[in-house]
Image (cartoon, rainbow, N blue to C red):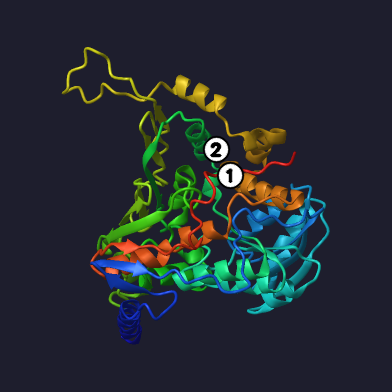
Amino acid sequence: MKKFLFCISFAVFSALALSSCSQNDPYGYSVKNNQIVYNTPPRPAGQQSMLGFSCDPIENVRVGFVGLGMRGPGAVHRFCYLDDATVVALCDLHEERVEKAQQILESHGKPRAAGYWGEEAYKELCEREDIDLVYLAVPWQLHTPIAVYAMEHGKHVAIEVPAATSVKECWDLVNTSERTRRHCMMLENCCYDFFELTCLNMIQQGLFGEIVHAEGSYCHNLDPYWDRYEGDWRMIYNREHNGDVYPTHGIGPVCQDLGIHRGDKMDVLVSMASDAFRGQQTADSRYGEGAYEYANGDNTSTLIRTRNGKTILVEHAVATPRPYSRMYQITGTRGFANKYPNQGLALGDAVPEDAGIEDLDAEKYMSNEARDALMARYQHPITKEGGLAEKAKEVGGHGGMDFIMDYRLIYCLHNGLPLDQDVYDAAEWSSLVEITEVSINHGSMPVVLPDFTRGEWNKSKGVSFAMAK
């Protein structure tokens, strides 16, 4: 009963907190003309934009890992294959996890790293003078506080998704990065999936014409995984928050396709969620019937309209037993691409002249053979560099996209180039965590998003991947 009352109290408090935001809060919102409008605070004196920012080349990037539970060990393994990076320090809540990560290093013939464990051990790691990059794979709620601490101590940071869980935290990342002149990259690995990268190249080469609509999602039944999260943190977050709490796998690649904050921006969104039918059943089976009221809807759908008149559909579903899908889909004036449930390309003019209007199968995907040949022709240039695609598939990590992500991060730091993803990507994509919940809690009211670039969203045109000469 106490747990139930706490949950109700928390829900009431959250609703009051969300409704109490006002224009007086620099990171809050107000209701204007039947829309929720988020504030965009002016850039504080002494800060500079991080658009296109590059640091001095780092001969060998010295890395400290914080978080060695689910995602951390795989990252340590992948970094052993990067010639221009060295694992200097390892940190986790538990000593045994640090030791297991040490064994990964030793299995690759690498020296043991400095080890830290405990609730605030990350501070010792961040305070070391021999670390260039802090790589975070900790629970979501710790992403921003540790990233800010690391940047304040002169470190670049790479943060697992989402980078933040509130709009205030998104601004904390932006302001700290701008003030300290340190990179802050969110590790959105789906941007480096082979299919998504190839489609991005096709878009930039004009094969799809003008992109008018894009879709992305995170549909992943987490029933087999809930118990693996330290202290039950992920289940707790889902049972206490509605909205799209994990939006970046879906939104990241399509934002790159649409050039978000590189010529366009996400302008207005509307979010709607189903009731928590399966989610409540899961909570009841885990904690006892009625112990908690589960907040996160079984399916959350969010529609976004961009400043340039494009639309995006993003979905989140982790409670129902549907097959895994990121729902990646691109619709252009000249072509169409779809990854789930089956990869497909359609480039128009596919309807036979004698097809009747009732022939709903007349416009088909191109054949698998033609699709594969076209995708091979338009393989993204970064995956061709030095046989990266083959090496990524060998090293692994979600089919290789994790390794491409890590490789590009170190490549850019090593060569003193702008990163593929910047702090504004981290903030914009992660801001949906709060903003979708605000829309739902206000009866699916439209929300005007803040501008984390502070008016510079159309300063550059399109995503580019910097390459050394």
Q: Amino acid at mark 1?
A: Met
Q: CA distance from mark 2 to mark 1?
A: 7 Å
Extreme-bottom residue of the structure: 2
Q: Secondary structure at mark 1?
A: helix
Estimate how packed mark 1 is, as few (under 14), some (14 to 19) or many (20 or more) residues with alpha carbons within 10 Å. Answer: many
Q: Say which quarter of the image contains residue 244.
A: bottom left
Above or below, 379 against 453 in this view is: above
Would you say the residues marked 2 and 1 are in contact, meaning their CB atoms lie under 8 Å apart? yes
Q: Secondary structure at mark 2?
A: helix
Task: Write down the residue under mark 1.
Answer: 401
- Quadrant placement of the C terminus: top right
Evaluate whether residue 73 shows in this view: yes
Estimate how packed mark 2 is, as few (under 14), some (14 to 19) or many (20 or more) residues with alpha carbons within 10 Å. Answer: some
Relative to the observer, which residue lies in front, 65 or 77?
65
Task: Write down the residue under mark 2.
Answer: 194
Q: Position of residue 39 (x, y in %)?
A: 40, 70
Q: Position of residue 148 (x, y in %)?
A: 61, 72
Relative to the observer, which residue lies in front, 85 or 452?
452
Q: Position of residue 76 (x, y in %)?
A: 69, 56
Q: Report the residue at 54% width, 39% height from top.
A: 197
Evaluate whether residue 166 shows in this view: no
Q: Report the residue at 26% width, 21% height from top.
A: 362
- With 209 as the anchor, is 172 left or right in this view? right
Q: Position of residue 442 (x, y in %)?
A: 26, 70
